[in-house]
Amino acid sequence: MIGYKLTPSQAAEISGQFFNDETTFNPIQDINGEWFIFGGEVNGFITVEEFNWVKTLQPSEYVPPINTNLP
């Protein structure tokens, strides 16, 4: 799966912040603890200028964590 990798400080900066009138950034960690956002958060309709820098992030391989909480 392809995502867009963030540094820990970038993830903290944008987490929960609105990038338009209705949608917030929701960075998640992969199996290696790296932070990612995905297509709609990068290619979506960003109306808050201070977050336009996410459009410059390069695609990177996201490996989802293994769910060990299955019944």
Image (spheres, rainbow, N blue to C red):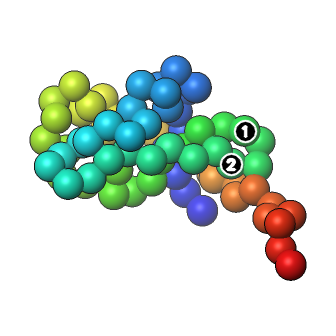
Q: Residue at x 43, y 36 (%)?
A: 15
Q: Quadrant of the N terminus?
A: bottom right
Q: Position of residue 39 (x, y in %)?
A: 39, 56
What residue is pinned by disc 2?
30
Q: Residue 68's quadrant in the figure?
A: bottom right
Q: Residue 40's quadrant in the figure?
A: bottom left
Question: For the residue labelled by badge 1, is the local secondary structure a helix, a strand or a loop?
Answer: loop
What residue is pinned by disc 1?
33
Q: Position of residue 62 (x, y in %)?
A: 63, 53
Is there CB contact under 8 Å for labels 1 and 2? yes
Other-residue count near label 1 (Cα within 10 Å), few / some / many at <14 / 14–19 / ≥20: few
Q: Position of residue 37 (x, y in %)?
A: 47, 47
In the rendered view, tell whether residue 71 sits above or below residue 39.
Answer: below
Residue farthest top in this picture = 9
Question: Is residue 60 among what the camera can see?
Answer: no
Q: Residue at x 66, y 37 (%)?
A: 34
Question: For the residue labelled by badge 2, is the local secondary structure a helix, a strand or a loop?
Answer: loop
Other-residue count near label 2 (Cα within 10 Å), few / some / many at <14 / 14–19 / ≥20: some
Q: Residue at x 49, y 31 (%)?
A: 11
In the rendered view, tell whether residue 26 sits above or below residue 40.
Answer: above
Name which residue type carries label 2.
Asp
Question: Is 60 placed left or right of 56 in the picture?
Answer: right
Report, in whole angstroms, how far the alpha carbon at label 1 lies from the one at label 2: 5 Å
| Numbered mark located on residue 65 in the image | none
In the rendered view, tell whether residue 35 sits above or below residue 41.
Answer: above
Name which residue type carries label 1.
Gly
Question: Is residue 55 among what the camera can see?
Answer: yes
Question: Is 20 placed left or right of 53 in the picture?
Answer: left
Q: Quadrant of the C terminus?
A: bottom right
Q: Position of residue 21 (x, y in %)?
A: 14, 49
